[in-house]
Image (tube, rainbow, N blue to C red):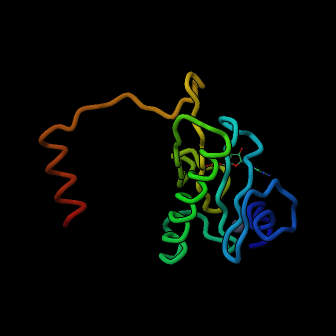
């Protein structure tokens, strides 16, 4: 897709610090890292978000995330690992080319991937089950 920065990075038109590359994906270091080793998995074909991503690439992206998580953990000796994937502006997506965040976590790093737990009421549970399961 024209003017998509992650299309250009994934396909090598714009240089990026590449940790891994194959025919379908490039894994790069995030330029604004949440922690040491924060990386992004980019498919080389354009899909704006998870809704547009073909099933086959979705499956491969998860396998690649597992492989990279192991590799990065071994190399950087992090203490934990978050895999984050944002869809839509309201969910924090700022680059509209599907990507998965690989975020190594370190004791006391203060990275804030958290929320305040709410309460699942009986009414809410029944509404959601009826709507989603149909
Ligand atoms: P998101 O908010 O989920 O869309 O994530 C976009 C991520 O892309 C952010 O973590 C940015 O720091 C990162 N980012 C934006 N532009 C670049 C770039 N040119 N190279 C590497 N990372 C980038
Ligand atoms: Zn793109």
Report the residue at 79% width, 71% height from top. 11
Position of residue 9 relative to residue 59, above or below, is: above
Closer to us: 134 or 65 = 65
Q: How many marks?
A: 0
Report the residue at 74% width, 55% height from top. 28
Position of residue 76 relative to residue 56, above or below, is: above
Occupied quadrant, residue 14: bottom right
The quarter of the picture where the C terminus appears is: bottom left
The picture places residue 79, in percent across and down from the top left corner, at: 54, 34
Q: Is residue 37 left or right of residue 89?
A: right
The picture places residue 119, in percent across and down from the top left corner, at: 23, 32
Q: Is residue 17 left or right of residue 104?
A: right
The quarter of the picture where the N terminus appears is: bottom right
Closer to us: 126 or 66 = 66
The picture places residue 47, in percent across and down from the top left corner, at: 61, 70
Q: Is residue 130 left or right of residue 35?
A: left
Closer to us: 62 or 85 = 62
The picture places residue 70, in percent across and down from the top left corner, at: 56, 52
Report the residue at 53% width, 55% height from top. 87
């Amino acid at each position: 897709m024209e003017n998509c920065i992650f299309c250009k990075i994934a396909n090598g038109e714009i240089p990026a610090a590449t940790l891994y590359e194959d025919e379908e994906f490039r894994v790069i270091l995030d330029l604004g890292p949440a922690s040491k080793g924060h990386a992004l998995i980019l498919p080389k074909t354009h899909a704006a978000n998870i809704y547009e991503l073909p099933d086959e690439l979705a499956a491969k992206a998860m396998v690649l995330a597992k492989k990279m998580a192991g590799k990065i953990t071994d190399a950087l000796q992090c203490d934990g690992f978050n895999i984050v994937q944002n869809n839509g502006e309201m969910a924090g997506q700022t680059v509209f080319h599907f990507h998965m965040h690989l975020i190594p976590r370190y004791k006391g790093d203060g990275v804030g991937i958290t929320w305040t737990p709410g309460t699942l009421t009986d009414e809410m549970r029944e509404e959601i089950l009826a709507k989603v399961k149909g």
